[in-house]
Image: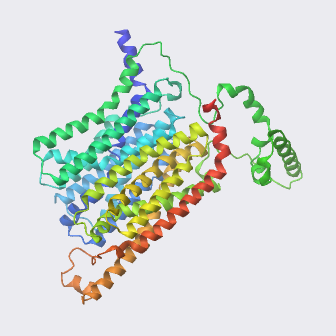
Amino acid sequence: MGKFGDRLRAFSTNRWLVFVAAMWLQSMAGIGYLFGAISPVVKAALGYNQRQLAALGVAKDLGDCVGFFAGSLSAVLPSWAMLLIGAAQNFLGYGWLWLIVTRQVPALPLWMMCVLIFVGTNGETYFNTTALVTCIQNFPKSRGPTVGIMKGFAGLCSAILTQLYAVMHTPDHATLVFMVAVGPSLVAIGLMFIIRPVGGHRQVRPSDKNSFLFIYTICLLLASYLVGVMLVQDFMQLSDNMVNFLTVILLILLILPIAIPVTLTLSPKAQHPTEEALLSEPSKGETSTSQEKEDQPEVILSEVEEEKPKDIDSLPPSERRKRIAELQTKLVQAAARGGVRIRRQPHRGENFTLMQAWVKADFWLIWFSLLLGSGSGLTVIDNLGQMSQSVGFKDPHIFVSLTSIWNFLGRVGGGYFSEIIVREHTYPRHVALAIAQILMAAGHFLFAMAWPGTMYIGTFLVGLGYGAHWAIVPAAVSELFGVKHFGAMYNFLTVANPAGSLVFSGLIASNLYDSEAEKQAQQHHMAAPRLLHNMGLLVDGPLKCEGSVCFFVSSLIMSAFCVVGAGLSLIIVQRTKRVYAHLYRSVRT
């Protein structure tokens, strides 16, 4: 009995158990991607037009990305409390929406409906923050794979819940709203005492590389399986038993990763875990020199970084230390005379507060690069229906589903390849982001050209690139600005997503689309859109635009700005390559 108790205790504190539980949580934490599936239900039940529905979409985007409260609370509340708050918000917002859609309670004014959508969707920021912060603490030197896998499973939420909805075989589409309200909340409550920091940096094993490889294999199988299932269900009419069988296979694939903590718990005791130093701490091999480096001038005063000549970094190490020592001596003398005020600020790679990060150029370069890349990607995701219909596709469902899969692969792949860059080459992670943004620029260009087949290729490139942002950027921020206040910084960075969407979708793409639609209406001798709407002829909202011209200019603009974003990413690479060389030097030795 004692041996069984020890094994059970070891299993409950295994960092891989926490990792797998966080994967399951994240597979329910992407409910924002389901808005396209539940919006027709809301529109039909409440009689909304397209403009009113767009207002709910904006509220959804804000709830999905504005996580200031979640980020701030993550530094003071335990993980279980964070998940409980998220579950309560999710259930309240979407549960009330379900009651309204099923006419069990009276409808609310539009602004209150926006508040409901915001509150319900904002619950997932607590899920995301808890999963990311906990897993980064448990896997401090595997941040790329960790963030990529976590964010990847969030992107699969819509595909998973849609498949579970298909099993219910119900014609009532409001049931999907009920699943959105109940499913994520139940999963969060069920896992809230499992997802927590367990001292994962002291549980490193030689088999960890194989464990990550197993997770990546499951990810690829899941993506391939879901693509196949979606294509089959889109082109064939399957029986209920076949749908049930396909869903059982999906659940098995989701459960399979639990084999990792089970195997590690049952493995022989000869495989003792070792300790993994945090990135901001020196490795054992560097212990003897770490104190010397702390006594060296270059890590004492932040003014040294600001005042040193640009060519000083190219000098030999001995000459560089001498020049920095001279510069610091001058600064100390100036401080004694009252000429300057010496302050101790954290350096990149140490723990920053959000306020301290705000005054760093690197932080804002990362934010604007994210705005240009992810903002243009979200614009495509939100407008896929109109984009596909404008070039002759009647049903946009296949492109929405495929983009979800490419988004998932981009997140997983972005984490994997960026980790190779930092570990094997000790080079900044933003190299991978620059490549992703160039791929997105190519995808936007293909959307503009609207050649045969470019919808498929464009969604593939933009989906991959967009997903890569959410694996690379959080990992890079945790490396450059520390883990202690990572939750607050991550949730501030996510504001770049709706901000970019507001610029590209709300100001550029929508106005250009409406302008072209009105031109086409005039060419067909149609009356003004407002008059037709009053006559009841425009029941689905604004006029529809047809042809490649609808998104030609806006796609070219987004393509150009993705190139600008790649340029910003390369600037970040140039500014932070010495930091990464220091952080990951011990990994290569």
Residue 458: give x, y in percent of width and height. Answer: 38, 60
Can residue 56 be seen by looking at this rendering? Answer: yes
Q: Is residue 36 left or right of residue 487?
A: left
Residue 319: give x, y in percent of width and height. Answer: 84, 42
Q: Return the residue found at the far front.
A: 452
Classify 260 as above or below 73: above
Q: Is residue 472 left or right of residue 578?
A: left
Can residue 111 be seen by looking at this rendering? Answer: no
Classify 298 as above or below 450: above
Residue in the image at 31% along x and 35% along y: 190
Residue 315: give x, y in percent of width and height. Answer: 80, 45
Q: Is residue 486 left or right of residue 330?
A: left
Residue in the image at 39% along x and 19% along y: 265
Which color scheme is applied?
rainbow
Residue in the image at 47% along x and 32% along y: 197
Residue 295: give x, y in percent of width and height. Answer: 79, 35
- In terms of depth relative to the viewer, which is nearer, 156 or 129? 156
- In terms of depth relative to the viewer, which is nearer, 129 or 563? 563
